[in-house]
Image: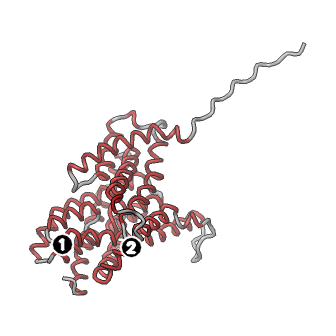
Amino acid sequence: MTTFRDAPAETPAPPARGARALPGLLVAVAVAAVATGLGELVPVVGGPVFGIVLGAVAGAVVPGLRGERWAPGYAVAAKPVLQASIVVLGTGLSLTQVLRVGGESLPVMLGTLAVALGGAWLLGRWLGVRGDTQTLIGVGTGICGASAIAATTAVIKPRQAEVAYAIGTIFTFNIAAVLLFPPLGHLLGLDAHAFGLWAGTAINDTSSVVAASYAYGGDAGSHGLVVKLTRTLTLIPIVLVLAVLKARREAGRPGSGVPALPWRKIVPLFLLGFLAAASLNSLGVVPASWHPALSALGAFLITTALAGIGLSTRLADMRRAGPRPLLLGGLLWLAVAAASLGLQALTGAL
């Protein structure tokens, strides 16, 4: 008689990637919802900053929010959702704005960007703040705060603690700028356009630029916002350069040529999406009536992304970083603010 052995029990198939990510992603969305509400109550701070702070606090206070069950969702929030937010935020930019303000403000914008990036390299070496933390603080100060840090994070893939520390540093000096810039502007006798240019080039996050420049009065608010949005476009070449450098390091080919890697490794798709969104808006394809909803969606997505980063962050890692990154951010902020006024004086914008 033929006998049959018991068939081995089948190993249950692992859940699909989407199913694994769902629990952690829902937690990040919930944190983002609370952060968005707080951001509306305190617009000077903004939802994204509340997102990373609440995420970090929740992860530290609620032990159950750490572990393998939640990590895949946090990772989805920190990367794909982050990249989607950058594309959506591109719909708020118009390439024609560069033409309108470029002749007046482009020299100041490029000069302050050079001061921020060059200063990050020099001061970072002096203070011993190197690597990704140095890069994130430099682009955050030089371009557009948390949004620039988010875009750079999607390319260079730093540790979550480094992202959290960089955003915390930027946040500290955003608050200082909102409180100090308007009275300093009046003390210096700046007109509305000069103050808008100063705020748009020397304050990091867009929400803080809006808060400071609209508080100043006159046309400072609208002018500062246009300068800030134009300044955000410099994110494209900066992130492209960082993507090339990252690809070279991963390929182990430090030579002068572009690495023989797929173009998607060098030109991230989300960055092309960001440029395409801004171009469509410039052409009028994106209806003006959509802008408020798209702006709110982009802000919520980036808040969700930063909540995921915060939930993944271990505060002990930030404490080990010490005070030097904060000092780097403060020195860069002062240097950029002074350079903006100096370049305005040199170009006759004051």
Report, in whole angstroms, how far the alpha carbon at label 2 lies from the one at label 1: 21 Å
- Residue 180: x and y, percent? 15, 65
For the point 42% across and 61% down, the residue is 151
129 to the left or right of 330: right
For the point 28% across and 65% down, the residue is 204
The residue beneath circle 1 is: 219
Identify which residue, 15 or 172, lies in the foreground: 15
User: In the displayed structure, would residue 164 be above or below residue 257?
Assistant: above
Identify which residue, 165 or 49, lies in the foreground: 49
Identify which residue, 230 or 136, lies in the foreground: 230
Q: Residue 95 has which mark?
A: 2
195 to the left or right of 120: left
Evaluate whether residue 20 shows in this view. yes
- Residue 250: x and y, percent? 57, 63
Query: Residue 235, located in which quarter of the rendered image?
Result: bottom left
Spot the residue most to the left.
187
- Residue 325: x and y, percent? 32, 61
Q: Secondary structure at mark 1?
A: loop
Q: Amino acid at mark 2?
A: Leu
Binning the other alpha carbons within 10 Å of mark 1 as few (below 14), some (14 to 19) or many (20 upward) gives some
Binning the other alpha carbons within 10 Å of mark 2 as few (below 14), some (14 to 19) or many (20 upward) gives some
Spot the residue most to the right.
1
The mark nearer the N terminus, 2 or 1, is: 2
For the point 31% across and 84% down, the residue is 103
Query: Residue 284, located in which quarter of the rendered image?
Result: bottom left
- Residue 307: x and y, percent? 36, 47
User: In the displayed structure, would residue 219 be above or below residue 264?
Assistant: below
Q: Residue 19 has which mark?
A: none
Task: State which quarter of the image contains the C terminus.
Answer: bottom left
Task: State which quarter of the image contains the N terminus.
Answer: top right
Q: Secondary structure at mark 2?
A: helix
Q: How many marks?
A: 2
